[in-house]
Image: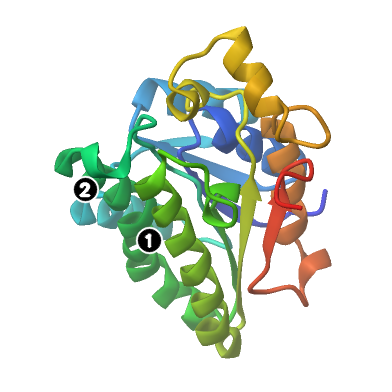
Amino acid sequence: MRLTGKTALVTGGGSGFGAGIAAKFAAEGAQVYVADINGDAATRVAQDVGGTPLVVDVADNASVAAMAKAVHSSGGLDILVNNAGVTHMPTPLEFVSEAEFDRVLAVNAKSVFLTARHFIPAMKKAGKGAILNVASTAGLSPRPNLNWYNASKGWMITATKTMAVELAPAGIRVNALAPVAGDTPLLKSFMGEDTPEMRAKFLATIPLGRFSTPEDMGNAAAFLCSNEASMVTGVVMEVDGGRCI
């Protein structure tokens, strides 16, 4: 029960890694807001973990502002997890469309800017808080043909370290997770096609021989957002089975 008495919000919490993080936080005693652009998915996960669903488009300022208002009106936030993310299909960098590029940067990068705008002032006032950004091994050891997704996760890693330095005097810790590909709804998009052969090719690059799971991410997130990690900030924890070695 490491998170008893804490209130947490997980974006992209309706599936995949976000759902795993929400479930672990709830198991550790936190009150969890499950935020997702898919309201049905958010509701299902929230019901499973005893949390509260929120519908949000993390790339839209008005939508994030409304989410923040709802959270603050109910007592504020201790833990913010920026997990929502999208990718483009594996494509040579010059052939990715402008619309795809804009979507990837809006959801993966702009969203961190928007949640910071709407949640950090209250955290500063409280003099405490933990922020966790879900980056990727793609930002550390990029795969070809995912160029702009890789770049967005590299941006998130730099943003995490910058936020950690700037917010430390306010008592706010900021860390990131860098998972390898997981068996989540995004896996097919990373691989281009979900076949046994393509899975084997991906798994061959992971020394431990398996994909990341939502439970792996939940365990790592719970540590970084708990008081056990009170001296940890600006860290990008690789949850990747050795992929980045």
- In-image side of 138 versus 201 (left or right): left
- In-image side of 151 versus 80 (left or right): left
Nearest-to-viewer mark from 2 and 1: 2
SS class, disc 2: helix
Residue 195: percent from the left, percent from the top? 55, 9
- Residue holding disc 2: 102
Of the pair 87 and 221, the residue shown nearer to us? 87
Of the pair 33 and 242, the residue shown nearer to us? 242
Q: Residues within 10 Å of mark 2 (few under 14, many from 20)?
A: few
In whole angstroms, how far apart are the C-alphas of marks 2 and 1?
18 Å
Is residue 75 visible in this depiction of the protein? Answer: no
Residue 17: percent from the left, percent from the top? 59, 35
Name the residue at 73% across, 33% down. Answer: 215
Identify residue type, mark 1.
Thr
Name the residue at 69% across, 41% down. Answer: 217
Identify residue type, mark 2.
Asp
Q: Residues within 10 Å of mark 1 (few under 14, many from 20)?
A: many
Residue 159: percent from the left, percent from the top? 46, 70
SS class, disc 1: helix
- Residue holding disc 1: 115
Q: Residue 118: which quarter of the image?
A: bottom left
